[in-house]
Image (cartoon, helix red, strand yellow):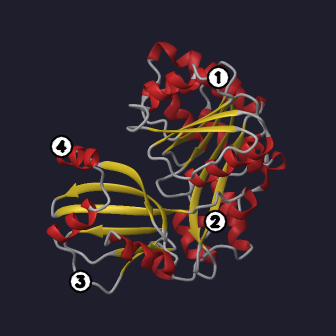
Amino acid sequence: MPRIDAFLKLGLEQGCSDVHLAVGVPPMLRMHGELLPIKFRELGGAELEGYVNEILTESQRQRFAEGHDLDFSYMSQGVGRFRVNLFRKNTGLGVTLRYIPSRVPRFEELGLPPVAEKITRFRQGLVLVTGSTGTGKSTTLAAAIDAINEREPCNIITLEDPIEFIHPSKRSQVIQREVGTHVPSFSEGLRAALREDPDVILVGEMRDPETITMALLAAETGHLVFGTLHTTSAVKSLDRLLDALPAEQREQGKAFLSQNLHAVLTQTLVRTFDGRGRKAIVEVMLMNKAISNLILNDKTFQIPSQIQMSRDQGMQLMDQALLEAVKNKEVDPDDAYLHANDKKLFARFVTDPDILPPEPR
C-alpha cells in the first residue's frame, strides 16, 4: 500500500475535504474550511518525493520531471478516490489531494435552492456554475449529470481535468473524457464531442477564449452545455465570457447570451452555525426578457437589481441568500459577514467584533 494512503485514511476518518502535504511543514487537513496541521513531523523533500512516486505512473513522472504541474485522479484502495494536484514551490514539492465521494449526491442532499434542479430540464443552450476554487462547482454539476442520467435516454459527454465523480451509464450513455489523457485540451475535446452525437456536454472549465467560443457554438447548435468559470457573480461571469471574445464578435456574443444562456449559479461555501460543516450558498440568475435586454444593451451592471426584484422566479443575489441563511441560523454569522458583498447588512449579526472595521473617530 502506498505510504501516502495512511494520511488519506486519517483525513477521511476526521471528515476533511482536502489533505495537504508540502516540504517543510507537517501534513495538514482542510476541516470545514480551515487548514489544520496534524501531529506529525515536518516533511522532508526526499520523504515526500518518495510518497508521491509511489502513486505516479511512468508518464506522469516524466511529465513532472519536465517541470509541469500534474492534475490527476488517484484511487486509494480501501480509502477512496481523490483529485490530486502535484506542484513545486520554493522549498520543494507540494501536493493537494481532494476527496471525491464514491456516490454522486442528489440536489436535495447538497442543500441547494429548489430552483437549482431546473438546470437539468433544459433541452439546449448554456448553463454556468461558477465560484472560486473549492466551492462545490464540480459536485453541483455531477448532481445535474446524474439527474439527467437517471431520467432521460441521452448521450452525455463530459470533459474533465481530471475525471472526478464516476458516472455509470443508467438511462443515458455517459462518456467521460479526461484532458491530458483522452484529449489534449478542453477546446479539442469540444471539437471532437460535436462529432460524437451528444445531447449534453459538460465542460469542466471554460478557461480560454477558444474553449469559450467552442462551448458557445455547441450551445447554439442544439446541445445542452454545462460549464464552469472561476467567477464570483452572475455579472462577472457574463463579462468574462464577453471579454474572451474577439472585439468583432462581441455583438454576436451578446446576442448569443441573451438567447441561449439559461442560468448562472454562483456558489460559495460558508461554515454552518454549529461549526461542524459548510453549507452551499448560491446566487441564482435565470434568463428572462428583462435580463436579456440588459445584456443586449451593455447594461449588465443593472442585472443585480433585476435579480433582487425577481425572487418570485427563484432568483436571488448572494447577499440575499446569505442573509436568509443567517436569519435561519443555518450558517455562522461571522463567516457570512466575511463572504458578504454589502457587509453593513450583516454587521448586526456578527459575534466577533474584531472582524468589524474600526469605527471612524
Say which of marks 1 and 2 sits in front.
1
Q: Amino acid at mark 1?
A: Asp
- Per the model, the C-alpha gap separating discs 3 and 1 is 53 Å
Q: CA distance from mark 4 to mark 3?
A: 29 Å
Mark 1, Cα crowd under 10 Å, few <14 / some 14-19 / many 20+, is few
The kind of secondary structure element at disc 2 is: helix
Q: Position of residue 332 (x, y in %)?
A: 60, 76
Judged by depth in the image, the label closer to the viewer, 3 or 1, is 1
Mark 3 or 2: the one toward you? 3
Helix, strand or loop at label 4? It is loop
Residue 307 shown left or right of residue 240 in the figure: right
Residue 113 in the image, given as x and y percentages of width and height = 75, 56
- Three-letter code, disc 2: Leu
Quadrant in the picture for residue 181: top left
Q: Does residue 71 appear to the left or right of 15 in the view shown?
A: left
Outermost residue, top side: 248
Of the numbered discs 3 and 2, the one sitting upstream in the chain is 3
Q: Which residue is mark 4?
A: 66
Residue under the image location 76 percent in, 31 percent down? 290
The residue depicted at 37 percent of the width and 76 percent of the height is 6
Which residue in the structure is indicated by mark 1? Answer: 197
Q: Amino acid at mark 4?
A: Glu
Give yes or no for contact between labels 3 and 1 (Cβ–Cβ under 8 Å). no
